[in-house]
Every structure is written in structure tokens, then in C-alpha cells.
């Protein structure tokens, strides 16, 4: 029986499938074959289209998956949530799996761009660490639409030698490094950078000021703006990717950066043997979490293959390989013992339990608040 | 004053050359660098061909480069055909109804921000797929169509200006001697505007070859072009095999330019010889 793509959703209801799929399959499929088709593991077309962040997977994972299931994976990469969002909202992306960040995903779920996961096809969901899962639960209650791929924090990335030279007793495990003008002024000459992610940075300021994270109160925003403006003169630039290279080169000495990115910067500096030691600390005040989620677009043409791949990524050994390669934390509890100890014992990637308690998730804000926030951010970036 | 000129002109020339070529030379230089950091020199272990080896093993980059060549070639051919037609109509067909509209529409992509063109194209393709089922999904076809729309505008401008400076009497003479309009076009007009067509083709190829913004909007599964790959790598810093790839591209282009110069020189010599022969007869 050859099913036209687009009819899979209907195969469970054989009668509907007949009505919906046109005349090509006029020979009525028996209920048994329809059920068999529904139970089958892969789609008829042995293809899977994946759209992921660049350099966000261990290079051997996709070939191994292709070999095991006889599927052809078209693996494409993007570099910003905005590009992904534009494509998703326009519809018919052609992709079967996309990897939005969780705060973007929450809005995309509301817009109806994803399909619900078929959990019977994802037995490896049992491996997910409940402690991490409960933190992104507000963004996708009950993991209905998405599974966590990696998570991380934004914190202090720094060049050990240069910071020591600029300020011997620098509080490298605290947000005071950025938000206390008395501290950050020491690093002006060696270069300080901030992420260009207003919703996330504002939460780090809230954490530093002891205000509730994700607060939408105008007075909290005003307090945060005041704190940011006070340190603006000491900031060299506001960017979310340039610092990886610059930190490794020694162009800058301090970056409010993402854990995995700083980890890759550290690897680069080590390989280059240029005398720079890059470290990452989760501030003791707490930190903001981000999650990158695996989701299946509503109009995906190979949803079964997509489920198969998600389930594959949730395998402990696969998850451990990816985590070891990209230096981001997996939320796969079964994978923890298999992860490269260098990565797993890095407290900047997998925080100690007592630090874990201070971590807050970045939640989507209302549109009106986002507008206010963006205006404030523009003022901060331009320094006026 | 003459002394000043003697000094001034070579300095400016050197400055101009430096401005144009130093970036390219530094890229070539760093492609032989052993370090994984693009801008940090690792003297003890350099020069090395390591990144050239890595480049040929990198399926993602090689695949993307192949795809980009394919799209750029198709784009250049289609743009030249459509652009020549549009340029011909605008330059030769006088004032017909809708000429202003056509002129405005062909130049619109020149001034339209790429983001808007890209988004408009994306929405168009999605709507078309829903209505008529073509183009099914996005990919090479949609990228090529999107590139043709803006490259064609550039080709049209080139052809139109070439035709505007072109002596009509040559065409009129051909028609006087009994050539039909089609024959005039193929035997007279086309050979005379050939340099403009070739430069239009090359321009269209280049425009498509390095377009990121529009491609990003209209690309679909397994249609990541080379600039898109390089651009997405920026997040983690460009890897040195991109330097190696760019060096190879410069090498290929330079070889092409030198070869064409040699061929043209030979043709010039032969023509001079033939003219001499004709004169001596």
C-alpha cells in the first residue's frame, strides 16, 4: 500500500484515510494493514530533515543513526532563533525536527506551529532528569510538544591570567564582576562584553539585585536599567557570538556568556596554546537557565522518522557523546555516567547541587513588557 | 608640481592596491596557519596544508560549495536571458503602454532591502505551494528563482545602458540589406552587446554566489549554500578550512583571468595579422 505523504495522521482511521487520500489507493486497505502502517517505525519515505544550531551535535551521531535505521538525514544549520521563527511562522518549512530555544518555543507553541509528541514512540523519555524537566515545565507543560536537547546557563566567562593581573582579588564567582561598577571598572582596558539577549540579561541583573526573576514590574525594570547604565562605560560591545573567538584570542578578558560557548572558547585557547586560560563560573547569586528543545513542526512530512531520531538522541550513549562533544549539559539522567568526565565534572556545565537550586528559567514575557524591555535595551546598547 | 605628482600617483596606487589586496593576501597567508584560531599565528608549526586536507574531508562545506556553484550558474544563465530581453525591450521598443511600470519593476530589486525581498519571496512560495502545489517545498528551485529576480535587475541595467550607447545605424544598415529582425538580432545586436552579456553573467553569478539573506529565507531542507554555512559558523568563529576554501577560489578566479587575458591577446594579434594580410592583398 502506498500512502501519499500527508495522510499518515489519518491512517489510524482507515475509513478517513480512504476519504482523505484520494483515489490512488482505491483498493481498500484492510483495517489490519492500516494498523500495521500506523505501528510501523519509520515513514514510507526514508528521509529526515533536521534543522539544528550550527556545531551542535557530535559529528558521528548522524551517520550512525542513518546506518542503524537506513534513513537519509538532511542536516541543515541555522544561527539565530529569529531565522527559525520566521520560517516556522511562514509554515511548510520542510523540516521534520527543529531546535528552538525554549522561550521562543513557548510562543511558537501558542502559534500552533508544532505537533504534539507521540510519547508511545519515545520510550527513552524515561531517561529525562525530572529535576531539569520541572524547570522548563512552565514553557511546555507536561512535555507535550518538545523534548529538551541541551540546557545551559549564562554566567561569567573570563581569562584567568588577565583578570588576575587587572584585579588580584576579583570576585570571579559573582555577578559583581559585571554589575558592580567598582569591580568592572578594573576590566575596562582588557575588554568586557555582554550578551545581546535582553530577556536573559535582564534576568541576570534581577538575580544580582535580588529581584524576582522574570518580573514584569516597571520599577524592577527601571532598577535594572539604572544598574546597566552605570556599567555601560566599561562594556566594550554587546554581542552574542563574537566573544567566543575574542575570549580565546585574549582580545577581551571578561564576557557574560553562555556556558557551552565559553567552554568551546576554552578549548580553542587550549589548542592554540596562546597562553590564555579561559574559565566559566556560574555566579553564586544564581544564574539564568536556557533550554534548547527538539520539536516537530505541525506540517512535518516525516513525523515517524522525527520521533525515531528524537528517541535516538535520548539514548544514554548518544546523549553522552553529544554532550561531551559540544560542552553543553544534557538533561538525560541515564547519560550522566557516560559523559566525558572533563565535561561532566566541570561545575560551569553541570553545576553542583547547591548551585542548581539557585538557577532560574527564562520565561516568555508579555508583548507590552517586551516592547518596554527592547526600548530599554536599545538605550543600553547605544549607551544613551 | 611634477615632482609632487611623481610621488603622489605611485603612493595612491600602492594605497589602492593595498586596500584591495591585503585582506585577500592575509586570508591566503592564514590558510597555511596551523592554529585553530583564524587570527592567531602558530609560527613553529606553520606553514601547513592541514586545513586543505580538512577542507576536502568536510562534506558539509564541499557539498555547500557544489550547491552554490550549481545555483549561481543556473541563476546567471536565466538572469542573462531575462535581463537581455528586458533591457532590449526598454531600450529599443520606444514608448509602449506599461513601459514605465516595467522600468520601475525591473529596477525595484536594486533598491529593495534584501530582507524585504527575502520575506516577500518566502511568503509567495508558501502561498503558491498551498494554492497550486508548486514549488513543492523549498530548496534549490526556490533559491534559484529568488536569485534570478534580483540578479536579472542588474543584468537589465547593464544591457540597457550598453544598448543606449550603441549605434542604431548598424542595425538599420543590416535591415536595409534585407536582414529580418530576428537575423539582425542574432547576427548584429547580440555579438555587439556580447561583452555586456558576459559581464552581466559574471555579475549575476557573483551576486548569487555570495547572497546570504535572501537564500536564508527561501532555503529548505538540504539546500544550504556555501555563504549560509560560513555565516552560521560565525557563532563559533570561522574555522580555518574556510580560509583554505577561499584561497582555492581566489586561485581559480586568478587562473581564469590570466587565461582569458592570454586568449584575448592572441586574438588581438591574429586580428592585427589578418588586417595586415588583407591590406597587403
Image (tube, rainbow, N blue to C red):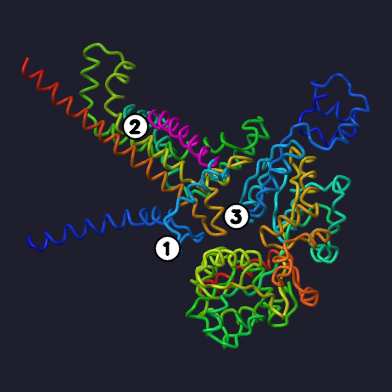
User: Residue B129 falls in which quadrant of the image?
Assistant: top right
Q: Tell me, yes or no, whether dots 2 and 1 are on the same chain.
A: yes
- At numbered mark 1, what does the secondary structure look like: helix, strand or loop? helix
- At numbered mark 2, what does the secondary structure look like: helix, strand or loop? helix
**Residue shown at 57%/42% (left/top)?**
B59
View extreme (top): residue: B178
- At numbered mark 3, what does the secondary structure look like: helix, strand or loop? loop
The tag earlier along the polypeptide, 2 or 1, is 1
Read off the chain for label 3: A
Mark 2 lies on residue: B197
Read off the chain for label 1: B
In the rendered image, residue A145, in percent from the top left (x then y), is placed at 80, 52
| Rendered image: mark on residue A104 | none
Sort mark 2 into few (<14), some (14-19) or many (20+) by Cα contacts within 10 Å: many
Sort mark 1 into few (<14), some (14-19) or many (20+) by Cα contacts within 10 Å: few
Query: Which part of the image, by quadrant, shows the C terminus of chain B?
Result: top left
Res. A213 visible in picture: yes
Q: CA distance from mark 3 to mark 2?
A: 37 Å
Q: Which portion, as a residue range, is magenta?
A: B63-85
Q: CA distance from mark 3 to mark 1?
A: 32 Å
**Where A158 sits versus A152, above or below?**
below
Amino acid at each position: 500500500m502506498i500512502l501519499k505523504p500527508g495522510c499518515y495522521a489519518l491512517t489510524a482511521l482507515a475509513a478517513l484515510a480512504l476519504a482523505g487520500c484520494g483515489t490512488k489507493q482505491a483498493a481498500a486497505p484492510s483495517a489490519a494493514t492500516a494498523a500495521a502502517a500506523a505501528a510501523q517505525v519509520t515513514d514510507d519515505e526514508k528521509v529526515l530533515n533536521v534543522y539544528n544550531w550550527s556545531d551542535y551535535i557530535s559529528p558521528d551521531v548522524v551517520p550512525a543513526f542513518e546506518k542503524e535505521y537506513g534513513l537519509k538525514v538532511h542536516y541543515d544549520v541555522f544561527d539565530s532563533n529569529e531565522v527559525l521563527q520566521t520560517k516556522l511562522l511562514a509554515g511548510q518549512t520542510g523540516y521534520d525536527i527543529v531546535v528552538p530555544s525554549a522561550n521562543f518555543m513557548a510562543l511558537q507553541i501558542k502559534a500552533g506551529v508544532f505537533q504534539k509528541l507521540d510519547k508511545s514512540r519515545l520510550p527513552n523519555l524515561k531517561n529525562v532528569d525530572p529535576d531539569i524537566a520541572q524547570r522548563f515545565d512552565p514553557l511546555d507543560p507536561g512535555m507535550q510538544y518538545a523534548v529538551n536537547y541541551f540546557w545551559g546557563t549564562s554566567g561569567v566567562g573570563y581569562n584567568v591570567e588577565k583578570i588576575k593581573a587587572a584585579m588580584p582579588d576579583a570576585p570571579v564567582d559573582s555577578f559583581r564582576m559585571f554589575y558592580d561598577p567598582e569591580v568592572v571598572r578594573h576590566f575596562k582596558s582588557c575588554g568586557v562584553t555582554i550578551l545581546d539577549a535582553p530577556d536573559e540579561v535582564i534576568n541576570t541583573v534581577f538575580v544580582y539585585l535580588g529581584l524576582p526573576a522574570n518580573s514584569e514590574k516597571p520599577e524592577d525594570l527601571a532598577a535594572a536599567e539604572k544598574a546597566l547604565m552605570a556599567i555601560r562605560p566599561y562594556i566594550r560591545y554587546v554581542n552574542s557570538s563574537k566573544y567566543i573567538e575574542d575570549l580565546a584570542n585574549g582580545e577581551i578578558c571578561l564576557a557574560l556568556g553562555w556556558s557551552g560557548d565559553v567552554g568551546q572558547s576554552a578549548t580553542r585557547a587550549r589548542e592554540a596554546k596562546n597562553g590564555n586560560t579561559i574559565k566559566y563560573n556560574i555566579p553564586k547569586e544564581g544564574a539564568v537557565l536556557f533550554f534548547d528543545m527538539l520539536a516537530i513542526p505541525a506540517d512535518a512530512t516525516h513525523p515517524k522518522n522525527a520521533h525515531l531520531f528524537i528517541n535516538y538522541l535520548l539514548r544514554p550513549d548518544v546523549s553522552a557523546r553529544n554532550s561531551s562533544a559540544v560542552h553543553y549539559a544534557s538533561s538525560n539522567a541515564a547519560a550522566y555516567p557516560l559523559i566525558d568526565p572533563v565535561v561532566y565534572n566541570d561545575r560551569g556545565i553541570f553545576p553542583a547541587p547547591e548551585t542548581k537550586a539557585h538557577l532560574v528559567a527564562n520565561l516568555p514575557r508579555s508583548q507590552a513588557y517586551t516592547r518596554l524591555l527592547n526600548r530599554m535595551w536599545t538605550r543600553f546598547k547605544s549607551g544613551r | 608640481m611634477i615632482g609632487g605628482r611623481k610621488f603622489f600617483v605611485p603612493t595612491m596606487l600602492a594605497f589602492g592596491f593595498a586596500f584591495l589586496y591585503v585582506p585577500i593576501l592575509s586570508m591566503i597567508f592564514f590558510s597555511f596557519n596551523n592554529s585553530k584560531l583564524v587570527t592567531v599565528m602558530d609560527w613553529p608549526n606553520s606553514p601547513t596544508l592541514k586545513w586543505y586536507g580538512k577542507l576536502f574531508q568536510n562534506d558539509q562545506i564541499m557539498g555547500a560549495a557544489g550547491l552554490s556553484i550549481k545555483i549561481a550558474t543556473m541563476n546567471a544563465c536565466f538572469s542573462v536571458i531575462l535581463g537581455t530581453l528586458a533591457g532590449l525591450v526598454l531600450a529599443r521598443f520606444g514608448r509602449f503602454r506599461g513601459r514605465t511600470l516595467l522600468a520601475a519593476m525591473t529596477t525595484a530589486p536594486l533598491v529593495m532591502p534584501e530582507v524585504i525581498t527575502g520575506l516577500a519571496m518566502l511568503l509567495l512560495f508558501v502561498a503558491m505551494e498551498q494554492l497550486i502545489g508548486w514549488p513543492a517545498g523549498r530548496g534549490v528551485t526556490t533559491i534559484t528563482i529568488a536569485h534570478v529576480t534580483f540578479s536579472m535587475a542588474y543584468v537589465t541595467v547593464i544591457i540597457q545602458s550598453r544598448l543606449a550607447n550603441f549605434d542604431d545605424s548598424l542595425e538599420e544598415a543590416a535591415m536595409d540589406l534585407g536582414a529580418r529582425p530576428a537575423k539582425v538580432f542574432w547576427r548584429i545586436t547580440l555579438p555587439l552587446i556580447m561583452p555586456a552579456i558576459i559581464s552581466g553573467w559574471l555579475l549575476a553569478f557573483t551576486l548569487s554566489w555570495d547572497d546570504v539573506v535572501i537564500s536564508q529565507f527561501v532555503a529548505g531542507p538540504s539546500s544550504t549554500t556555501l555563504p549560509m554555512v560560513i555565516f552560521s559558523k560565525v557563532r563559533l568563529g570561522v574555522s580555518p578550512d574556510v580560509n583554505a576554501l577561499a584561497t582555492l577560489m581566489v586561485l581559480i578566479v586568478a587562473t581564469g583571468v590570466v587565461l582569458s587575458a592570454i586568449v584575448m591577446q592572441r586574438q588581438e594579434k591574429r586580428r592585427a595579422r589578418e588586417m595586415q594580410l588583407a591590406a597587403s592583398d
